[in-house]
Image (spheres, helix red, strand yellow):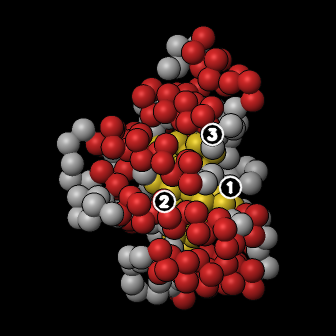
Amino acid sequence: MLIVGERINASRKTILEAIQERNAPFIKDEAKKQVESGAQILDVNAGVRVNTEKEDMVWLVKTVQETIDVPLCIDSPSHEVIEAGLAAHKGKALVNSITLETKRLNNILPLVKKYDSLVVALAMGEKEMPETVEDRINICKEIIDKVDAAGIPLENLYIDPLVHPISTNEKNALTVVESIRKIKENFHVKIIMGLSNISFGLPNRKLINRTFLTMVLAAGMDAALIDPTDKDMMAAVFAAETLLGQDQYCANYLSAFREDKL
């Protein structure tokens, strides 16, 4: 599974303070810790300070890439911020994200093509959120058609089927699991997810999140935005990949054990 480290996000107080103070050592340490813990891509989000988001994003991208050699996920609702981040980025980035919203597609897909980046597509319609498996399949088809028509290779596309909390509907986790299976069967695209929304409103959220992780991995998930410094979460990744036959001779699991990562 591709692990996208989620910790460099301005919604976290310590990250926001580091951005405001241009505390490069703090940001670099956060980046290094995530990569050492297993992240293969790092999400960078500077969205809290709207008036300075573009400058903050460029600073984050340059600062993080000074200390680690992995791609970044340029995460913003603003296409202008995304373009600034892509222009500053060295190598092939991941853009987070597009939906079926026409304005957003028209603004971001040309950037994805220009910079030959990967892109996350949320299974979200022009205005509505998906509720059923069928909703997600229909939206997924429309997104794939738009991405294909824009001349972007489908291997650069990651679909996020959107996770709703089980606290609002106890079937929401099962709906996502079935959606992943159906999307993979019908379209053969990669699946990415942010897991934490599944546990919103519940106690001991980390337990729910890592249990859900094993379910969606078994369904065919390819990538996830997680906190790679969460040892229990990473242990669940190693164990699940081993049980799913994705770890030849259990080599990664055994290495993780020897390195005290379990």
Q: Where's residue 202, x and y in %?
A: 21, 48
Q: Which residue is tagged 1?
A: 93
Q: Which mark is residue 165?
A: none
* Separation of residues labelled 3 and 1 (CA atoms): 28 Å
- Identify the residue shown where x is 58% and y is 63%: 181
Is residue 23 at least partly visible in the picture?
yes
Q: Position of residue 214 (x, y in %)?
A: 49, 43
Mark 2 lies on residue: 177
Q: Residue furthest top?
A: 258
Amino acid type for the residue under numbered disc 3: Leu
In the picture, the quarter occupied by the N terminus is top right
Circles 2 and 3: CB atoms closer than 8 Å: no
Q: Reading the chain from its start, which is encountered first: label 3 or label 1?
A: 1
Alpha-carbon span between mark 2 and mark 3: 15 Å
- Looking at the image, residue 166 lies above or below residue 141: above
* Residue at the disc numbered 3: 244
Instruction: State the SS at label 1.
Output: loop
Can you see residue 82? no
How would you rate the neighbour count of disc 2 (Cα within 10 Å): few for under 14, some for 14-19, many for 20 or more? many
Q: Quadrant of residue 105?
A: bottom right
Q: Residue at x 76, y 51 (%)?
A: 91
Measured as percent of width and height from the top left, residue 226 is found at 47, 43
- How packed mark 3 is, by other alpha carbons closer than 10 Å (few <14, some 14-19, many 20 or more), is few
Q: How many neighbours does mark 1 have within 10 angstroms: few (below 14), some (14-19), or many (20 or more)?
A: many
Q: Earlier in the sequence, mark 2 or mark 3?
A: 2
Q: Secondary structure at mark 3?
A: loop
Image coords of residue 179 (percent x, y): 51, 67
Q: With respect to residue 166, does 110 lie above or below?
A: below
- The residue mark sitting in front, 1 or 2, is 2
